Image (tube, rainbow, N blue to C red):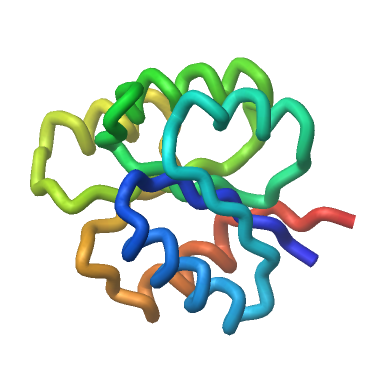
Amino acid sequence: MMKILVVDDEAETREILKVFLESEGYNVSLLEKGENVIKTIASEIFSLVLLDIRLPDVDGIELLKKIQKIDAELPIMMITGYKDAEKVIEAFREGARDCILKPFNFEYMKTKIVSEARKLS
C-alpha cells in the first residue's frame, strides 16, 4: 500500500487530506510541524510527501531541500493557500513535482498523486 506523508499546520487541511487520501486507498501519516519531518522521513518509507510551503516553525522550501538530501527520489508536492508566485517558482526550482493550491481540486490532485507517487513493494 502506498503511504503519503501530509505536512500542514492547519488541522482542518490535514483532516480533509486524510479523509480524501484514505478514501482513495492510501495509508496517510500527518504532521503539523516541520520539526518532526526529517526524523519521520529517515525512519519510514513514503510514496509521496504533501508539504505546506508555509509552516510556523520552518520554511517549506528549506524543508523540501532537507528531505531531498535524505531521499532524492521521494516525490514532493507542495501545497499552499497563498498565491505567491515567487515561492511556487522556487519550489519547482528546488525539485517539487507540483504545487497544489487551496482550496483543493480533488480530481486534479488524484491524477497528480497517481502519476507522481512512487510504487513501493
Residue situated in front as seen by the camera: 71 or 34: 34
Q: Determine which quarter of the picture holds residue 38.
A: top right
Q: At x 66% / y 70%, what residue is drawn?
A: 26
Residue 75 rendering spot, x and y as whole percentages: 57, 43
Q: Is residue 86 above or below residue 99?
A: above
Q: In this view, does 87 lie above or below 109?
A: above
Q: Determine which quarter of the picture holds residue 11.
A: bottom left
Residue situated in front as seen by the camera: 21 or 88: 21
Q: Is residue 103 left or right of residue 21?
A: left
Residue situated in front as seen by the camera: 34 or 66: 34
Q: Is residue 21 above or below residue 42?
A: below
Q: Is residue 49 left or right of residue 14?
A: right
Residue 37 rendering spot, x and y as whole percentages: 56, 31
Residue reaching furthest to the right: 121
Residue 82 rendering spot, x and y as whole percentages: 12, 47
Q: Is residue 12 left or right of residue 75?
A: left
Quadrant position of the C terminus in the picture: bottom right
Residue 95 rendering spot, x and y as whole percentages: 44, 30
Q: How many labels does the image show?
A: 0
Residue situated in front as seen by the camera: 108 or 54: 54
Q: Determine which quarter of the picture holds residue 21.
A: bottom right
Q: At x 54% / y 52%, what residue is drawn?
A: 30
Q: At x 57% / y 23%, what residue is drawn?
A: 68
Q: In this view, does 77 lie to the left or right of 89?
A: right
Q: At x 50% / y 76%, what residue is drawn?
A: 19
Quadrant position of the N terminus in the picture: bottom right
